[in-house]
Image: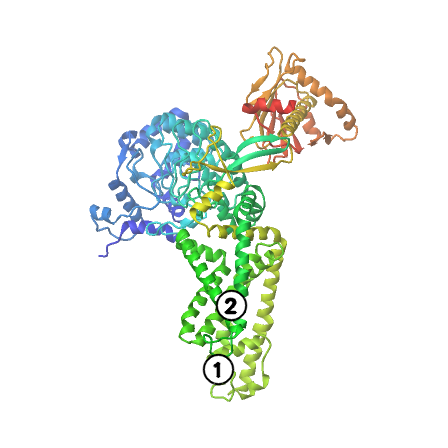
Amino acid sequence: MTRLSMGGLFSRAPEQDPDYAWRRQNEEELTNPLYKFVNLKREGELLTVFEREGEEGLRRYCREHLESYLYDGGNGKRIDKKEFVLWEAHQAAKGCAFVETRSEEEILDDWKEDKFNKFRDHEACWDLYKRGGVGETALHLCFLNNTHNFTKIAHVLLDMYPQLALDYYEGEEYYGESCLHIAIVHDALDSVKLLVEKCGADVNLRATGRFFLPEDQKKLNIMTKALMTTDYKGYAYYGEYPLAFAACFESHEIYDFLVQKGADPNLPDSFGNTVLHMLVIHNKPSMYKYAMKHPTKPADPYRKNKEDLTPLTLACKIGRPDMFNTILELGSQEFWSYSNFTCSAYPLFSVDSITAEGETDWKSALMILIDGRSEWTLPMLQGGVIGQLLEEKWKVFGRRTFGLQLLWLVLHLVFLSTAVYLRPDNIQLITGTTASDIARYITEILIVINAIVFLLLEVNEIRMVGFMGLIKNILNVPDKVLFMIGCVCIVLCIPMRFTKLVEVEDWLLGIAIVGSWFYIFFYCRGWTLTGPFVTMIYKMIAGDMARFGIIYLTFLITFAPAFWIMFRDKPTEKFDSEIGAVMTLFQMTLGEFDYPVFNLAEFPALAKLLFVVFMMLVPIMLLNMLIAMMSNTFQEVVDRSEREWRRQKAKIIVSLERSFSKSSLQQFRTDYSIRLQENSAVHLPVEPGPHGLRALLVIKEETMSRAKKKSGVVASWKKLKNLAVKWAKSSDSAPARVIGKHARDKLSLQAQSLKLENNKGKKPPQGGKQNGFSLKKPDSHPSLHEIVEDAVEEEEEREELEAKKKNSKGESLNLQTFNVQVNRNNDERDAASCSSATSLIQVEPATEPQAATVTVLKKDGTDNKVTVEGHVNPAFETGENADETKAGEES
């Protein structure tokens, strides 16, 4: 009987069928007893009993029917590796027509641990052998269904059996996912608190199943293959930890609670990503700022993942320009500001291509942006911090080094050309005594010295940057590699001269001339006039010509043997050999051919037919396709010529860096940066070396000063408040005090609620903060009720003028910064006119920062909405920055 590896079968099934876990779970709904309690269709006996008999009936049902599915009646049990492996083998055997012949020891020996799902001994409450198709429990399904009744049922189960909170999915697809993860996804704070505080759920439990991996990792055989470089794109890749889940879903209250209970934002997942890395991947700038500046446990923005990428460099790699700018600003220190000018220092750690030790940082933001192919990388090189960094490098060492090397190259090419043109026709290259021979000797000696010096410098550069650095240099500067080959050929000409191998010397010298002159294109990239055109040449060679060459070579290989066999043993020199046939077809491609020669073929009619087919496919179709592709490439480069030129200039600067020693690079880094002192307000990295932490000083011009921003935002909020109060009054609602509650996202206009309550018999607020919204009571008004009344009176005259122009179906209010549209029919007007003692005005979060919807909720359940659209400055700060807002308004 054939023995079958259970672990291997279990690991291969999901790889062969991406829907394996889902299909298996649905198939077991008919046979697995677990699904009679609750299933994925939001049905089950637990729900039926709860709706029919209430909570007490549910508790009685659980004691009678559910406890047999739990370890020790709900007290739990510790699961070790042996029991887990045997259960995994049991799961693999379901539905398979074979008999297991291995012993338990053999099963343990054959088991291979998953590279992502790392098993560890843990507590469990629900029996492993009585779980669902993917290792879930009834509690998981209750949280997954996410209805009001199922949430109540889940809370009852946790109250009866707190150990259920320790269970998590044991199957490979969702391994590690707990009820805590599911509750976070549904933003259920009460459930999260119940799971953690009362039931002791692990706040650092990792969901590492295949479902939670990036998409490119799901395609691997993760049992046998090593991890590869990933793009981190995944539909459910949220960082494995509950805290990372809360951050990715922007659940601030859950995030605070988990941090309070011991969750660490700096814990790495399987790819080394922390919470901040995940926020970059999911493009959450506001949450990134919140996590980084958290008062209890701030996240470290300088942690690197397994690809040696910080959150900043990760934003460069995957194309997150907003995150890139946000991270730069959060790490900066502002020294002074005057009007709309600010002076700030930006740490060079993970930004500059030169490290504190003078080495090349291949994972720096600058290197990633230079090598990047995304459209957004070009603007980043043109301005901002990166543009300033490149400009400082150019001033410190780039301009001088570039000029000296260009002068040296021009002299080298002049000497090389002189030596070639003075070369005699005879083979007497050593014994010449004429003036031209002496001049040739001098130029030959000079070019040999230049070639040897250049090769020695390149060897030293290779020693500094390593072999991988050499490979990257070849990709970035191919013309420099051609020049290196030319120098090698020049040095090899020396032994050829003394051995009188003139023909070999001529071969080497011909290669050296072409390779040396190509190096001039490297310096042409640094000029605005020629840089874009050199870029076009590179792109056409690497892209259009490469694709054309593959197709064209295929046609040559196809037709050349056919022509050669038809002209074999015929009196013609064009197709007398295989190489001759290929070269003749190449000439035919360019339009040069001798039509009468086809009459000499063994089959003239067939030869002429092949000639016609070849001419239609290659010169007519293929060459025109090449012209079209080149035209498209030309237009692309022209459209972004200046930005592309700056990228090429950046590549030149980085290439020049590699020609200096480590000590020189350290000195250059010190020259174009300043030393940054410790600052408790900003988390700074630690750099080794005597120079300390270096930063780039940047003076920026903002479109608006800070004081104007704050005063504009305060004015906008006042007008929004007046609109809400006026709308409430027009609906017969008694105006009262306004309590604003601003969302945590301080960079967008997304207010959560504004309440209007009857002030009769109530004391007005005494200024200060109310629910996070700063309200300052003027001295001239004894109560906030009177403030609201004054605001309404200010708008009544404007309302009376515009009401005459509008019909009963709509109103339009034109304020300075708002366009308000109120659309309602007569029925809604009647409903809105119902009297009520208390009305609630809500400002719904808008899809854009320039829009919000105001809803007036009446006691009878009716509501009216006002859509407020207009420009509102997003720099509004509340709560902690209330004093700054006041200062800005006074300014």
Q: Tag 2's secondary structure?
A: helix
Residue 485 in the image, given as x and y percentages of width and height = 46, 64
Residue 123 falls left or right of residue 378 = left
Q: Residue under circle 2? A: 513
Residue 564 in the image, given as x and y percentages of width and height = 48, 82
- Residue depicted at x 27% and y 48%: 111
Q: Image quadrant for the N terminus?
A: bottom left
Report crowding for label 1: few under 14, some 14 to 19, many 20 or more residues within 10 A (C-alpha): many
Q: Amino acid at mark 1?
A: Trp
Q: According to the image, what is the colour scheme of the structure?
A: rainbow
**In this view, 122 is above or below 533:** above
Residue 8 falls left or right of residue 219 = left
* Of 235 and 573, the residue lying toward us: 573
- Residue depicted at x 43% and y 35%: 300
Q: Tag 1's secondary structure?
A: helix
Q: Tell me if I can see residue 807 in this picture.
A: yes
Q: Between tags 2 and 1, which lies in front?
A: 2
Q: Amino acid at mark 2?
A: Ile
* Of 109 and 699, the residue lying toward us: 699
Q: Residue under circle 1? A: 564
- Which of the marked residues, 2 or 1, is nearer the chain's N terminus? 2
Outermost residue toward the top in this view: 761
Residue 291 in the image, given as x and y percentages of width and height = 47, 32
